[in-house]
Amino acid sequence: MKKVIAILLTMFLLTMPVLAVIDLVNEDIQITVSKAAVAPIIDGKLDADSYAKIPATMADYNAYGGDDEYDDWMKANLPEAYISYDANNFYVLLIGNGSKYFYCDHDEDSEGDIWNQSCIQISVATADASGGDRLEIGLALNSSTKVPISHIWAQSPDGREEYEIVIGTNAAILLDGGKLAYEVSIPWKTFLPKDPKAGDKFGFNFIYGYSDDGNRFGVEYSYGCCNGKNADLFAKVTITDTVLQAAPTEAPTEAPAVTDAPAAPTEPPNEVAPPPPPKPIAPKVGDIGAIMLIVTMAASGITLFRRKK
């Protein structure tokens, strides 16, 4: 009997699948998130007063998929990750290089398979979640039609409401100048049993994926998604009461000071002065005789008039 049991045990061990041994080089990532001074506009653009960048190097990321030929390129083109929050939402903006290994031929009929090409995957969970207890969402952009695609692989069992992706409202994808950006707002109520406060923690992980004509590779921030769905391996985010500094606004330009106007001239400018009175014309010598004759005649007339009367 013991021999039979030993044979059966040996056969069982030989038929078991080989389990991958994961080297958890960053299994305990601890980061913080600050409050947005102004809620970001979900458009795929970086609002300086709405996000803080997660400091990360290749040591903080995990390469996955593909083969070694892409490693140097990935190290030189690490995605930038920005996060923030407000009373209602957790915000995530991921910006990477979309000029070379950007390929996605999926559409709405195959949205659940966007994970195997260029896309992002974001997972959030409670701080004590384990296994598959998480909210996991994905965004992709069809590289030919430029039509955005989204998918939800798992709803959180700890959420009070299910999450729904609405492109243009709570999710956006922007390809601009060789940069491929993905942005989402995730309501607290979709993965937490109550709204958090400063000091509370939650789990967070993301994947930024690339594709070379369908060959999938990329980087993962923490473990817990690609190598098995395990929320316990997510990075832990602590909520702070720090408010991000709002971008300064330009001060209004002051109008130049008005100085006292110069006194008005006594005479209007350019006014033509009245001409001087004409000078009396001096009689010529030849005219004296005529004048005397007229005077004499006038005197004679007056005298005659008096005599007749």
Image (cartoon, rainbow, N blue to C red):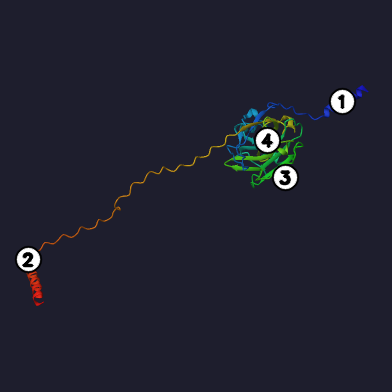
Q: Looking at numbered disc 1 in the image, what kind of residue is underneath it?
A: Leu
- Tag 1 residue: 9
Image coordinates of residue 64 in percent, x first then y, are 68, 32
How far separated are the C-alphas under marks 2 and 3? Answer: 129 Å
The disc at residue 207 is 4
From the viewer's perspective, is the residue at label 2 or at label 3 nearer?
A: 2
Classify mark 2: helix, strand or loop.
helix
How far separated are the C-alphas under marks 1 and 2? Answer: 165 Å
Of mark 1 and mark 3, the one earlier in the sequence is 1
How would you rate the neighbour count of disc 2 (Cα within 10 Å): few for under 14, some for 14-19, many for 20 or more? Answer: few
The part of the image, by quadrant, that contains residue 125 is: top right
Of mark 3 and mark 4, the one earlier in the sequence is 3
How far separated are the C-alphas under marks 1 and 3? Answer: 42 Å
The part of the image, by quadrant, that contains residue 99 is: top right
| On screen, residue 286 above or below 195 | below
- Tag 2 residue: 288
Pick whichever, 249 or 177, lies toward us.
Answer: 249
How far separated are the C-alphas under marks 1 and 4? Answer: 40 Å
Q: Looking at numbered disc 3 in the image, what kind of residue is underneath it?
A: Ser
Image coordinates of residue 239 in percent, x first then y, are 66, 31
Of mark 2 and mark 4, the one earlier in the sequence is 4
The disc at residue 261 is none
| On screen, residue 282 above or below 162 | below
Classify mark 1: helix, strand or loop.
helix
How would you rate the neighbour count of disc 1 (Cα within 10 Å): few for under 14, some for 14-19, many for 20 or more? Answer: few
From the viewer's perspective, is the residue at label 2 or at label 4 nearer?
A: 2
